[in-house]
Amino acid sequence: MPQFSVTSRKDAPPLTTKEKFTLFAKSATDPFVFVAVGLQAGISQASDNFESYGQGAAGYGKRYGAALADSFSSNFFSNFAYPSLMRLDPRYFRLGQGTFKHRLGYALAQEFVCRRDRGGTTFNFPNVLGAFTSGGISNLYYPPEDRGFGLTLSRSAISIGYGSLGGLLSEFWPDIDKKLFQKKQKKTQPVPPPK
């Protein structure tokens, strides 16, 4: 799982506009994104969401294209456009220590709190506006019966929910990975020969 937008450095310097674009480009083109979009399109097809897309390869292709466009536009506005315009940092700053409850609250709050390029924190306008902008743009390519204000709000809320889940993974995955990897490593290390 890519961690391009995560840092454990508390004193990380702010990203330049070029670095924010690079973050967007890497996040948008990582193979993980294409796999995740494929899974999302498969679930959408299995549950027959966006019924007018139909079934079969053509229906799956339309669902895949719509999910990929959602991912791309959300990433563009949340990680590059709005952070650059507002001079805000789109990265997740991993806490990495403290109680589970504290880290859980911190991770969930990061969907709504971000750092300013000049220091301090503020409301995470890029995440929220990015979700609503992407949700609004999706009205251009979703079937007519799946468009409208209510559906835009729904898609935006789902995007923010995914962001919150991403924050939880960013905060806790290194701990989980370390615990799982160390167990495997201990079991597979060869025994040194006697002296």
Image (tube, helix red, strand yellow):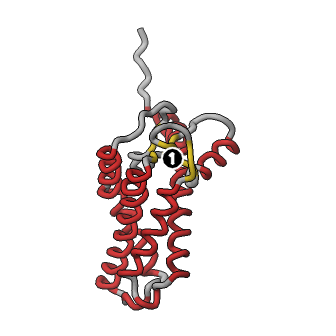
Percent from the top left, x then y, of residue 149? 52, 81
Q: Is residue 83 left or right of residue 115?
A: left
Residue occupied by mark 1: 170
Asked if 105 appears above or below 185 in the picture, the reply is below
Q: Is residue 23 left or right of residue 171?
A: left
Q: Is residue 56 visible?
A: yes
Residue ID at (34%, 74%)? 64
Q: Residues within 10 Å of mark 1 (few under 14, many from 20)?
A: many
Residue ID at (49%, 82%)? 47
Percent from the top left, x then y, of residue 7? 46, 39
**Count the marks: how many?**
1
Residue ID at (53%, 50%)? 169
Asked if 37 appears above or below 149 in the picture, the reply is above
Q: Secondary structure at mark 1?
A: helix
Percent from the top left, x then y, of residue 193? 40, 16
Q: Quadrant of the C terminus?
A: top left
Percent from the top left, x then y, of residue 121? 56, 43
Towards the viewer: 193 or 24: 24
- Residue type at mark 1 is Ser
Residue ID at (37%, 66%)? 73
